[in-house]
Image: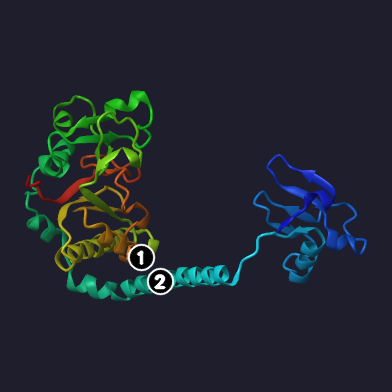
Amino acid sequence: MALDVARLEKVRHSPAGKITARCPACAEDGGDRTGNHLVIFPDEKFACAARAGDGDHRKRIMALVGIRSEVTFDAEQRRQWWKEKHATRQRSIGKQRLANSARHRRQELIRQYGWLREEVWEDSPQRIDSDLVAMDPAHFLGSLFLPDDLLWTGEVHQSGSDWHAERWKTCSEWAATSTRIGPMTTPAVWMPGTISRASNNVLRSPYVVLDFDGFDGIKPITPDELSRHVLDSLAIIRWLREAMAWQLAAILWTGGKSLHAWFHTPPPEVLKSLLPVAQSLGMDAGLIGRPEHPCRLSGQVHKGSGKVSRVMWVQARTQ
């Protein structure tokens, strides 16, 4: 229910859209003579500054100046509304249960699928014993994409204007260019003529990048926390690869507090099932399923730490 402003006294409109007026419930008893108790916000919510939290007072305001909706619901519409509300609540409960289950199983998974850095490097299909594999951004892109795939690299802000068109080149063009590659790229292949990193310009998304930036949304701070975070994240990556049969393409340390795991994009229903448990497993859920979102390339200096991003594991494309 909204309030009928025309029935209020001492109404004042602020440039920001907020309205102040004399509270009609206070005015019944002769109160609020200055006319500043009632506040109506731009979204039509309202409050009495003198009686905050007083439900009966709020009801009285609505009774005096409220606008009642003329919309009525029959029994079937009301039943359907409650059914949808119950279903929404059950989905929310289900997601929370999944997240709690993942949190409780996390240490078991980390113990069972522990993957030391040295083991990761040894297990990599491409040997990580040269700067070419570990730090060359063109080599990294060439390992994952086809020569004719149109790719974006650049700073995050380099998108959306005609002069940003040079940030889109084919994979083979990036390998031969004198233009600086990076510092960021995306797991997307883009449509010809693209100048904007908008989702509707994505031609296909062969990879999904999982950003391991902190378990339960808590980022590591100390060197010990960072070391533990890397090891725990590697264990979850190995679990996804071995137990869940996700096809790993690359692991990259960003130079800061994150690991990026590049996986071949799984079916939509599989990717969707990861969302409720992502944060419990150390991932940024907001980036999952967003191939247009930038992620760091190898060989790039991290502005926060001053360290250089490096590949830890990489599988060359097979076709």
- Above or below 14: residue 3: below
Q: Residues within 10 Å of mark 1 (few under 14, many from 20)?
A: some
**Location of the C terminus (image quadrant):** top left
Determine whether 15 is above or below 56 in the image.
above
Taking 30 as reference, is 201 left or right? left
Identify the residue under disc 2.
96
Q: Amino acid at mark 2?
A: Gln
Q: Residue 146 falls in which quadrant of the image? A: top left
Relative side of 126 to 1, left or right: left
Residue 142 to residue 4: above or below:
above
* Residue 156, quarter of picture: top left
Q: Residue at x 23, y 70 (%)?
A: 110
Amino acid type at mark 1: Pro
Residue 305: x and y, percent? 32, 46
Q: What is the distance, in whole Å, between disc 2 and disc 1 at their CAs?
A: 7 Å
Q: Residue visible at 17% across and 69% down?
A: 113
Please state if 279 lies on the left or on the right of 254 as rendered.
Answer: right
Q: How many marks?
A: 2
Q: Secondary structure at mark 1?
A: helix
Residue 8 makes an appearance in the image: no
- The residue under label 1 is 276
Quadrant in the rendering for residue 16 = top right
- Residue extending furthest toward the right: 30
Q: Quick one: label 2, few (<14), some, or many (20+) residues within 10 Å?
A: some
In primary-sequence order, the first of circles 2 and 1 is: 2
Between 229 and 98, which is closer to the camera in this rendering? 98
Determine contact: label 2, label 1, CB under 8 Å: yes
* Residue 127 is at least partly visible in this image: yes
Report x, y in % for residue 259.
26, 54
- What percent of the width, then of the height, locates residue 106? 28, 72
Quarter of the picture holding the N terminus: bottom right
Local SS, label 2:
helix
